[in-house]
Every structure is written in structure tokens, then in C-alpha cells.
Amino acid sequence: MKAWILERQAPIEERPLKMMEVPEPHAGEGQVRIKVIACGVCRTDVHVAEGDLPLHKSPLILGHEIVGVVDEVGPGVTKFSMGQRAGVTWLNYACGECKFCKMGKENLCPEARFTGWDADGGFAEFTVVDARFAHHLPEHRSFEEMAPWMCPGTAGYRALRLTELGKGGRLGLYGFGPTATYVLQIAHAKGMQVYVVTRSEKNKAAARELGAEWVGGYDDEMPVKLDGSIIFPPVGDLVPFALSQLDSNGRLVLGPVTMTPIVIDDFNLVWQERSIISLAHVTRRDAEEFIAIADEHDIKLNIEVFPFEETQEAMIRVKHGQIKGNAVIRVAV
């Protein structure tokens, strides 16, 4: 099969991925093989390619926003049958036995493996995954539309869950990229009010179009105290700023996988039971619930589709913020 292979980490502008012919994988016990139709491009793919995250295997196939069709079913699999649609997220495996798995936090499992990092991902014509960690997809949605559901959609849903807000809650979003776009729509579906803070005039316009209650910049005065907030840019200086806009008992969720140093030098920012929690990966529950919500409420995101041969060009544009929405690679015609 054709696959983009990462053997050495380097700036993505140096095009460290190589298109190669490699042996097709086959489904083993408890596994399914998925013919990849489309795969979204995430900034985390760039982090792995460039060395911001350590290389866990080499050679490696990146890509963890995978959608396609099951074309091989291994022994013991009952969840899927041939020809069914399936999606794969960042979480590729968890042990199911540790204290975190048993408390519903398999994302924190010490034995967890991640797609496109510990296991080969979707920048290839086929991928193999434990059937328990693949997800059923609706038949009436396009594959390109659903690819970002597997990462920014699912991760955004988990970030919103971590705020613990319900109907009527006032939610702040700092930064407004693909993940925040999903969060705003989910929050509205759940009856929350959304307040967006972003520098980009383009993103301000997008947030207004999606019905945010208030949209402003970092120098604008927030009109209300917020019950919960999510930070998306990896900027540590935003943490005290966002805390200052939280009401008592408010919770701040840190969405990035990495962040610049955080300095909180005023105890009043966390007084009155304000709290901070980081987002660490996703669970199968997050994916299943988000897929259902996105389908029911017709949650949308702008996408730019690239042919398989232009995968690295798409990654370069993702790195430099040149994508309107989410980049998606069309692997199969």
C-alpha cells in the first residue's frame, strides 16, 4: 500500500515524510482493517513530525482523524462487519484494568497507546485497529466532513465536559479555531451562553455568525463573569487573564497539548474555589457522544480537502495557520 512514512523528525518545511510502498497490514485477533477514505490533519501531527513530541516508533505513519470502511474483520470481532463505516481517534488502546480505566478515565491509562504516535495512523491506504477502539459512523455524512470529528470535535467535546457546565452556563472560549468552532455549536445545543475572545477579525466574524452571545478581543471588557472557560492557544500568559474573568466556583480548562510557562502571582485569581484542569487526550465515550450530537444537530466546520499526494503541503499550511477550518486528506477516490 502507499503510505507517508516518518523516519526522522525535522521541520515540516523540510518535508521529512516520504511516500513509500509498504506491505499492507492485516487484521489480527480482535482487530479490524479500515480502508482509509479520508484523514484530517492535526497540529499534533506537525508536533510529532518536527520533534516537539518525542518519536515513539520509527518508521511511523502519522494521522489520527481517520474515517473509512471496514474491509477486513479479525477473529473474535462482533462490533463491526465488512463494509461498515468506521472512525479512529487519537486514543488507540487502553488496558481496561487499571484504576483510571475502571473510573471511566481511560485517557489517563498508563498503558494507553495513541494513533499516529504509538501506532500507525491514517496517512496511508489502510490502517488496523483494535475493534473496541473504532467507532461507528453515520451513513449519510460525507467522509471528509466526519474526519475532523475524530479529533477537534471529540477533544472539544471532552473539554466542554470538563468545564462541568449545564444549561444556562456562561462559557468563555479563548481562541477560535476548529476545536472552538465545534465547542460553540455543542454548547448552544446544550443551552449554554458562549463568549468568545480572539485576536483574529476573521475568527470574530465566524463566532458571531455562529451566534456567540459576545465576541471581543483581549483588550475588550468581558460583559459578564463566566462560569467556565476553555483556553485553546498554547499561551501560558492567558491563564491568569482567563482566571480573572471567571466567577466563583468557575473552572478553567487548558486545551493545548503543550503550553508556555504559566505564572499565577495573585492568590485572588484562584480564591473562591476557582480551579484549573488540563485536557489530556480523549475517551471512547467522548467520541461516541460527540458523533451522536454532531449528527443530530448538524454541527458544521469549514474544511479544506487535499489529495493524498499533497499531505505534506497540507501540514505546512496547518503549521502556519493558513487553513480555513480543518485540513482533510482524501486518501481514496
Image: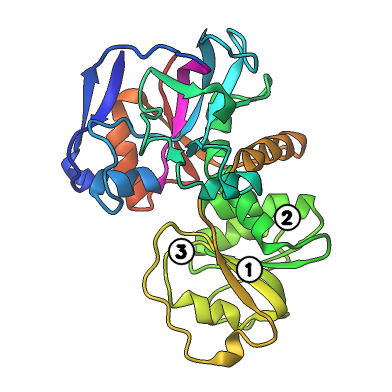
Task: Kindly check if marks 3 and 1 are in contact, taking CB atoms under 8 A apart as contact.
Answer: no
**SS for tag 3?**
loop
Helix, strand, or loop for circle 1? strand
Q: Which residue is more in the foreground, 293 or 265? A: 265
- Residue 329 location in percent, x, y? 41, 29
Q: Are marks 2 and 1 in contact (CB under 8 Å)?
A: no
Q: Residue at x 61, y 38 (%)?
A: 284
Main SS of the magenta part reads strand
User: Is residue 34 found inside the magenta-colored segment of the image?
Assistant: yes
Q: Which residues are magenta?
A: 30-43
> Residue 106, percent across and down?
57, 44
CA separation in Å, label 2 and label 3: 19 Å
> In what quadrant of the picture does the N terminus appear?
top left
Residue 95: give its label. none
Q: Spatial distance from mark 3 to mark 1, Cα to Cα?
A: 13 Å
Q: Quadrant of residue 97?
A: top right
The amino acid beneath tag 1 is Ser
Could you say where residue 81 lies in the image, as x and y percent from the top left?
Answer: 62, 10
Q: Secondary structure at mark 2?
A: helix
Going by the image, does 299 lie left or right of 307? right
Q: Which residue is mark 1?
A: 229
Q: Within 10 Å of the Cα at label 1, are there few (<14), some (14-19), or many (20+) other Cα atoms?
A: many
Residue 128 horizontal/vertical position (percent): 44, 20
> Label 3: which residue?
233
Q: Amino acid at mark 2?
A: Ala
Side of 321 where 221 appears, left or right = right
Q: Disc 2 marks which residue?
A: 187
Q: Amino acid at mark 3?
A: Pro
Q: Identify the residue at horizontal 58%, vertical 7% (top origin).
A: 82
Q: How is the image coloured?
A: rainbow
